[in-house]
Image (cartoon, grey):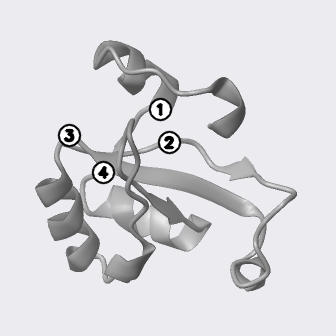
């Protein structure tokens, strides 16, 4: 399954990403393979993959989030998904 969470406003965005604005969300999946396959389907740059100890994800701008939803991504709060998977992540980094 592929997921996106709600858009959030991030006041501190790295300079390279600032051209895309301050509203972002996460795109993640139940498996890395599924995430990469879906990312290719919606034309994400695979270099944008953020691999982590807790979950692998892409950061999406609003237009890419809409595209992900149109292509079947489920809207899911990340905190809920992490809890269901018995994973933890600092609330300040979400």
Q: Is residue 5 left or right of residue 81?
A: right
Horizontal and vertical percent position of residue 13 = 78, 66
Name the residue beneath numbered marker 4: 73
Residue sitting at x 14%, y 56%: 34
Location of mark 1 (residue): 78
- Badge 2, how many Cα within 10 Å: few under 14, some, many 20+? many
In the depicted view, which residue is nearer to us: 57 or 22? Answer: 57
Circles 4 and 3: CB atoms closer than 8 Å: no
Residue under pointer 3: 30
Residue shown at 62% from the left, 37% from the top: 94
Q: CA distance from mark 2 to mark 1?
A: 6 Å
SS class of the residue under badge 1? Answer: helix
Can you tell which quarter of the image residue 38 is in? bottom left
Residue at 87% across, 57% down: 11
Q: Foreground mark, 4 or 1?
A: 1
Report the Cα–Cα distance between label 4 and label 3: 12 Å
Measuring from the top left, give residue 93's x and y in whole percent: 66, 38
Q: Are marks 2 and 1 in contact (CB under 8 Å)?
A: yes
Query: Mark 3: which secondary structure?
Result: loop
Mark 3 or mark 2, earlier in chain: 2
Residue identifier under label 2: 5
Q: Nearer the viewer, mark 4 or mark 3?
A: 3
Residue 23 vertical placement versus 41 (above, below): above
Whether residue 44 is visible: no
- Distance in Å between CA atoms under marks 3 and 2: 14 Å
Name the quadrant containing residue 20. Answer: bottom right
User: In the drawing, what numbered circle is on residue 14?
Assistant: none
Quarter the N terminus occupies? top left
Q: Earlier in the sequence, mark 3 or mark 1?
A: 3
Disc with the residue nearer the chain's start (4 vs 3): 3
């Amino acid at each position: 399954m592929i997921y996106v969470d709600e858009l959030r406003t991030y006041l501190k965005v790295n300079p390279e990403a600032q051209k895309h604005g301050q509203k972002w969300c996460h795109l993640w999946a139940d498996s890395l393979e599924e995430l990469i396959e879906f990312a290719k389907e919606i034309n994400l740059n695979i270099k944008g993959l953020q691999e982590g100890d807790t979950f692998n994800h892409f950061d999406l701008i609003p237009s890419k989030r809409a595209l992900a939803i149109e292509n079947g991504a489920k809207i899911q709060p990340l905190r809920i998904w992490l809890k269901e998977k018995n994973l933890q992540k600092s609330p300040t980094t979400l």
